[in-house]
Every structure is written in C-alpha cells, then in structure tokens.
C-alpha cells in the first residue's frame, strides 16, 4: 500500500513535498490541541500557541531546506524558554527529533554536523535554564538520531550509485 502512496507523498505542492506538508499539518493539529487544552501546561497560550505553530510548520522545510527547519525550531523554542518555560511536550520532542534526522539525512557531513550541534546546543541550553539533569539523554537521543540520518544518506547514495552502474551496464550490453 505504501508503494502506491509514495509517489503521491513526494509530489510537490507549492514547492514542498506533499508528505512534509501532511506531517507538518498533522503535528500542528496535535500541538494546537495540546496548547489549547493545556495538556501539558507550558505557559500562556499567547506565547505557546505561536511557538507550537512555528515549530510544527517548520517541518514543511525539512527536506527542501533543513537549515530553515533548524532555525525556526531553535528560535521558537528559545523564545518560549525565555518568556515562559521550557517546551516539554512529547510533540515538541518529536519535532526536534525529525529536524535532527532531516538535517543529517539531507546535508553533507559538515553542514549536517553544524545543524546537529545547533539542535543539541539549544536543547542543552533549555535544560540548563530549566535546572534539569538530562544532558546525557539529550546527547544520546539527538546523537543517535543524527547517526541514523547519516546512515540513511549513505544508504541512499549507495543505492543511487548502484542504479547508475546497473544502467551503465545495461547500455553496454
């Protein structure tokens, strides 16, 4: 079934892959519902609602320009951290994980490392402001996610080269 959906999810809408728009929209609905119900309470809605919308809609850029996703997510979360309290909902963690994976999977190693470090640094800063102690968790979670993104990029590159080689052999035959 996914085989039939895959071409539709990759089809661009206004320059964005449909799958990224669907993902951003679904997480945006979850985030807005979370903020409006106050579950979990992360501060006043006039702060947390725009942050929820910005961070989730940033996922629309996860393939097109992962740096934009990183910039939007980090900025919004830092604004919420300094004006209210540290984002601690599950949906915000999911957004951060997807952004770290995307930056690692779609950029060359140097830019991917910078994007990953910005995300980890931002999370470490938020943890410090919140007087938390989950630094190792942050490094392991985001580091592992970043490594999965790099492995995905490597795998896609190898598959692409194998396909090109196969086409070259077919032309020679």
Image (tube, helix red, strand yellow):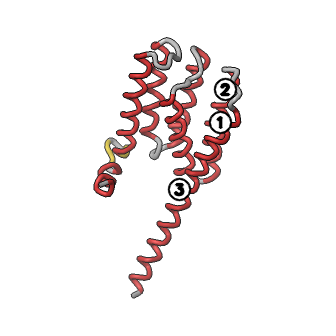
In the figure, residue 74 lies in which quadrant?
Answer: top right
Name the one closer to the observer, 164 or 3.
3
Mark 3 crowd level (few <14, some 14–19, many ≥20, 10 Å Cα): some
Q: Image quarter for residue 81?
A: top right
Q: Secondary structure at mark 2?
A: helix
> Distance of mark 3 from mark 1, alpha carbons?
21 Å
Q: Say few, some or many: other residues with alpha carbon within 10 Å of mark 2 (under 14 / 14 to 19 / 20 or more).
A: some
Q: Earlier in the sequence, mark 1 or mark 2?
A: 2
Q: Residue at x 54, y 36 (%)?
A: 96
The mark found on residue 138 in the picture is 1
- Residue at 50% x, 69% y is 161
Compared to residue 4, the image places residue 72 above or below, namely: above
Q: Which mark is residue 127?
A: 2
Q: Is residue 31 shown left or right of residue 146?
A: left
Task: Classify 23 as above or below 50.
Answer: below
Which residue is located at x 66 percent, y 36 percent?
137
Q: Is residue 9 above or below residue 124?
A: below
- On-image quarter of the C terminus: bottom left
Disc 1 is placed on an element classified as helix
Check disc 1: other Cα within 10 Å, few if <14, some if 14-19, many if 20+: some
Q: Nearer the viewer, residue 144 or 158?
A: 144
Q: Position of residue 136 (x, y in %)?
A: 70, 37
The first of marks 3 and 1 along the sequence is: 1
* 111 and 100: which is toward the camera: 100
Residue carrying label 3 = 152
Disc 1 to disc 2: CB gap under 8 Å: yes
The N terminus sits in image quarter: bottom left
Front one among 62 and 68: 62
User: Distance between the Cα atoms at labels 1 and 2?
Assistant: 9 Å
- Expressed as whole percent of the image width and height from the top left, the position of residue 31 reads 43, 26
């Amino acid at each position: 079934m996914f085989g039939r959906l895959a071409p539709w999810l990759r089809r661009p809408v206004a320059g964005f892959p449909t799958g990224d728009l669907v993902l951003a929209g679904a997480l945006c609905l979850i985030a807005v519902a979370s903020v409006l119900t106050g579950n979990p309470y992360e501060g006043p809605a006039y702060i947390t609602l725009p942050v929820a919308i910005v961070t989730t809609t940033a996922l629309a850029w996860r393939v097109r320009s992962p740096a934009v996703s990183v910039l939007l997510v980090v900025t919004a979360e830092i604004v919420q951290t300094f004006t209210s309290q540290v984002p601690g909902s599950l949906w915000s963690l999911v957004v951060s994980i997807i952004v770290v994976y995307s930056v690692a999977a779609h950029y060359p190693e140097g830019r991917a490392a910078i994007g990953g470090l910005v995300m980890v640094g931002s999370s470490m800063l938020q943890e410090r402001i919140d007087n938390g102690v989950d630094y190792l968790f942050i490094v392991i979670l985001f580091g592992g996610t970043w490594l999965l993104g790099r492995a995905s990029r490597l795998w896609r590159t190898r598959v692409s080269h194998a396909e090109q080689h196969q086409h070259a052999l077919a032309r020679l035959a």
